[in-house]
Amino acid sequence: MADSQKSIFSDSYSMYGGVKQKRKKARVKLDIACEIGLSNGKGTPVTAQLTDLGTGGLSLQTTSLFYEGDVVTISFMLNKVKTFIQGTVKRIAGKTTTVIFSELPPDVHARVQEFIHKHYFDPKAKL
């Protein structure tokens, strides 16, 4: 009889429990040039590097100064389509700025979801 406490996976496989896993939505690591600017139109958008993307938020690297609570617009190319996403700066740590989305338009949500799906399930896809 099988031991109910043993995993069917090898010991090298690990899964985060609810305590460690904070995100509810999948994200992918990437390195894409983007522009970020204040949504109210003040200031000039600046160039940054998008390093992490999901349907709930993103992270980017920039030397420009943003503050928690700033509403920003980020533009970048995704699946060969110019994509614009609006969100709120959630956290800043050094050069890393984390943005959460309030709600993505359905077409942008589908494009991001397709990108994530290709990343995880289609090893031949060119991202």
Image (spheres, rainbow, N blue to C red):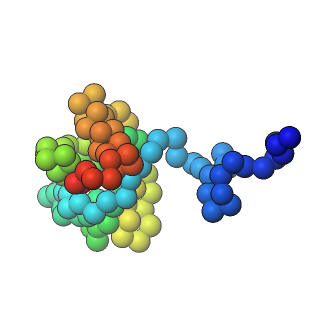
Q: Is residue 40 left or right of residue 94?
A: left
Q: Residue furthest front?
A: 1
Residue 87 in percent (x, y) is at 33, 44
Q: Judge by depth and name the residue closer to the eye, 16 or 60.
A: 16
Regarding residue 15, the answer to whether it shows in the image is yes
- Residue occupying image coordinates x 65% and y 52%: 9
- Residue occupying image coordinates x 22% and y 54%: 126
Regarding residue 39, the answer to whether it shows in the image is no
Residue 51 in percent (x, y) is at 33, 61
Q: Is residue 19 left or right of residue 96?
A: right
Q: Judge by depth and name the residue closer to the eye, 45 or 3.
A: 3
The vertical placement of 17 against 114, above or below, is below
Residue 41 in percent (x, y) is at 16, 47
Q: Quadrant of the N terminus?
A: top right
- Residue occupying image coordinates x 63% and y 62%: 12
Q: Quadrant of the C terminus?
A: bottom left
Q: Is residue 7 left or right of residue 77?
A: right
Q: Judge by depth and name the residue closer to the eye, 3 or 105.
A: 3
Residue 78 in percent (x, y) is at 20, 48
Q: Is residue 11 left or right of residue 101?
A: right
Q: Residue furthest top?
A: 106
Count of marks placed on residues: 0
- Residue occupying image coordinates x 27% and y 53%: 124
Q: Quadrant of residue 110?
A: top left
The vertical placement of 95 against 38, above or below, is below
